[in-house]
Structures are given as C-alpha cells and as structure tokens.
Image (spheres, rainbow, N blue to C red):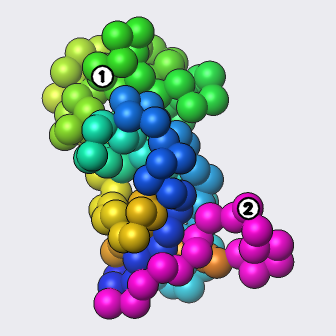
Amino acid sequence: MTTDVAYAICSFNDIPSRRAIGFQLMIVAEDGSHRPWPIFIIRWGKQVFGYLNLCPHDKVNLDWERNQFLDGNGLRILCGKHGSLFEIGTGMCVDGPCKGESLTPVALTVLDGDICVTGVTLVEDDDDGEDETGLQCEEG
Ligand code: FES
C-alpha cells in the first residue's frame, strides 16, 4: 500500500550535519497489519539520506551503540556487528561481509524544516502524541 502522505519524523535541525539518528517506527503493511519499521536518517549538509536499520548481511540493526551509524571517520555507514562499510549516498556496501549488497533506501523529503518519510503508511500514535514521530505534515 503506497501513499502520497509525508510523515514528519523530526526537524531538519534535530540532526547535526554528518550525524545519523535511528527511529523505531511502525508501518501498516499491505495486509493491514502493523509491523516495526526501524530506520535511520543521516544528514549531510543540506542533504538527508534514509535507510532501513537492517544490515543485509545478518539482518540485524546497524548501530550496536545507539545512534552510532558511522565509522570512525564519519564518512561511511558502519555495521557494528561485523564491520561492513556502506556508502552514505547510495547505501552500497563497499567493504565487509556483505560487499556488493545494499542497504534498503527510505524515501525522504524535507518540508517546512521537517524531515518526512514518504511512500509508506505509518501507524500514527494518538495516545501521547507529544514526543512521538509519525506526525502527518502534508497530504499530496
Ligand atoms: S550483520 Fe552487518 S556485517 Fe554482519
């Protein structure tokens, strides 16, 4: 089920340039069920890149220390488990056990200073909206 709705995940300024933050989201699957959708967003200057937080090698989350997605130089995405390195701009693994495979990209757009995900239906959290992600910021 795809949708034109963009969901605000965080403010553009919440992520310093050359840093990444992970988000535990829930999406509505094709069959209507809800499933976890862990993603992370990297900001690089004025650009943002989003990927599923899932290493293609062993299907585990990449940040073995919370929100530590980048290597020591801050130039590549690092899988904390076995050290695969991925290009920030493409998600392509350039070194390590899953060399040649890619992270799954997440479509992002920046609207009114918010980083939004598109192309999915997020489960919106109505209970205690305050600090939660999944705020709908525009209908297209
Ligand atoms: S799980 Fe990421 S390199 Fe092995």
Give the class, few, some or many, for how many residues have Cα within 10 Å of label 2's Cα (few <14, many ≥20).
Answer: few
Residue 122 appears in the figure: yes
- The quadrant in which the N terminus is found is bottom left
Kindly identify the amino acid type of the residue bearing the numbered disc 2: Asp
The percent coordinates of residue 49 (x first, y second) are 31, 47
Instruction: Examine the rendered structure and indicate whether residue 36 appears above or below residue 89.
Output: below
In this rendering, the answer to whether 108 lies above or below 139 is above
- Mark 1 within 8 Å of ligand 1, using the beta carbon: no
Q: Does residue 48 sit above or below 30 in this rendering?
A: above
- Identify the mark nearer the N-term, 2 or 1: 1
64 vs 98, nearest the viewer: 64
Specify start and end residues of the magenta stretch as a single range: 125-140
User: What is the number of the mark on residue 131?
Assistant: 2
On the image, which quarter does residue 139 sit in? bottom left
- Distance of label 2 from label 1 (alpha carbons): 29 Å
Return the residue found at the far bottom.
Answer: 140
| Residue 55 appears in the figure | no
Q: Could you say whether the residue bearing mark 2 is in a helix, strand or loop?
A: loop
Where residue 119 sits: x, y (%)? 34, 74
Q: Position of residue 82 (x, y in %)?
A: 44, 14
Indicate whether residue 134 is drawn in magenta: yes
x then y, percent, for residue 16: 46, 36
